[in-house]
Image: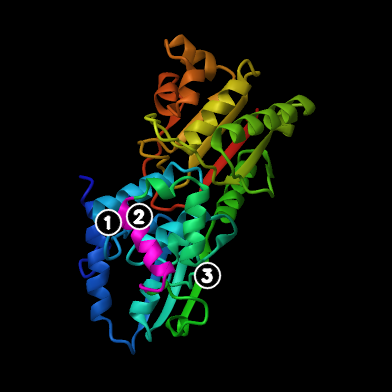
Amino acid sequence: MGPSQVITPDSSLECTAGDHPEPGQRSLAAAAALERIVGLIPRTDEVWLLLSGGTSSLIAAPETGLTPAELTSIYSLLLGSGLDITAMNRIRKRFSRWGGGKLARALAPAKVRGYVVSDVIGDDLASIGSGPCVPDPTTAREVREQLEQTGIWRRLPESGRSLVLSVESGNRPETPKPGDDAFTGVSLEVIASNRLALEAAARRARELGLTPLVSDTPLSGEAAPAGAVLARRLLDHCAQSDIQPENRVCLIWGGETTVSLGEQSAGLGGRCQELALAAARDLSGAAEGVALLAAGTDGRDGPTDAAGAIVDGRTWQAIEGSGRKPAHDLAQHNSYPALDAAGALLRTGLTGTNVMDVVIGCCL
């Protein structure tokens, strides 16, 4: 099946696939299809909205004054900025057609029931998919200030800066705010989340005879330092444990790290791969049976065909044995070829569900 083909469960349902993690032509087509459908809905009807993580890109179309290429460049800048998903979507909704409550405004006064798959820590409805049916509490001024603080403002296309400034000056309307009539008939419910994924992983661990220890602290921050910290925690736990068959454990973390690429980075990888490569360095020489998995629940980590990677005490040396320099690859955010050289990449295929990332460390 080609990348543009979509399986539909019923011939009466129209399906349009968008692009991810950066918007492309398919995202524009999806946004246009949504616009057409919204125009056909009687405002006395009830609308069911199924929303998942990734929607920010999958139905991304530029606001008036931006070109599609400029919107893609803004998304690319944000993806490499090191900002977490909440901060990123707070900005992205400014430049996209449907984010920041704009879909609710287009559907009003129809009643909207939303069922949401969360891909953000804390399940903040305003952040998931850039909150197409949720009030946007952030002002254009606050967005500009954050862009300036992160150094992205000067790198935005001129039209992007003009858009933000025109809203800030009152020459262009703000996004719908809390209390807006557009949200009177909207109700949203989270039906899947990272916490539910961790609980499922723990159940499966028990079925396999392992004792799961699920972290209460969400995984966040830069991927490489996080990988080093988790590897050391795993090693410390394994050193303190009497690893008998009946005492085998696995440590489970969930959340989402970030990768700050910088202006000149040309490496290939994703946050889970970078975390795993950093962990491999600290796990180097660890006993057999000590291993760590880091993977995106949607089956795709960054712009690659891998969900993440599985590393152990031999991975770092295997990369070196292939002729690569893993420390250099890590510094250049080039985790994919390094892990591929060691046969450590995890390729699951797309799962169709994004509830952030899962990291599992085992002492077997």
Residue 149 painted magenta: no
Q: Residues within 10 Å of mark 3 (few under 14, many from 20)?
A: few
Report the magenta stretch's main SS.
helix
Report whether 11 appears left or right of 343: left
In the displayed structure, does residue 165 sit left or right of residue 279?
left
Total labels: the figure holds 3
Task: Confirm whether residue 230 shows in the render.
Answer: yes
Q: How is the image coloured?
A: rainbow
Of badges 3 and 1, nearer the viewer stands: 3
- Can residue 355 be seen? no
Query: Distance from label 1 to label 2 (Cα)?
Result: 7 Å
Quadrant, the N terminus: top left
Residue at position x 25%, y 71% in the image:
35
From the viewer's side, name the closer residue of 247 and 23.
23
Amino acid type, residue under disc 3 in the picture: Pro
Q: Dividing the picture into quarters, in which one does residue 233 lie?
A: top right
For the residues labelled 1 and 2, say whether their Cβ atoms are less than 8 Å apart: yes
Question: Residue 137 got which mark?
Answer: 3
Q: Amino acid at mark 2?
A: Ser
Disc 2 designates what residue? 57
Q: Provide the residue designation for mark 1.
A: 27
- What span is in magenta? 157-172
Estimate the x, y position of residue 181 in percent, counting from the top left: 45, 85
Query: Dot 3: what SS?
Result: loop
The residue drawn where x is 65% and y is 18% is 287
Question: Disc 3 to disc 2, how far (Cα)?
Answer: 21 Å
Mark 3 or mark 2: whose residue is earlier in sequence:
2
Q: Position of residue 169 (x, y in %)?
A: 42, 70
Q: Position of residue 201 (x, y in %)?
A: 58, 46
Q: Secondary structure at mark 2?
A: helix
Q: Quadrant of the C terminus?
A: top right
Task: Identify residue type, mark 1.
Answer: Ser
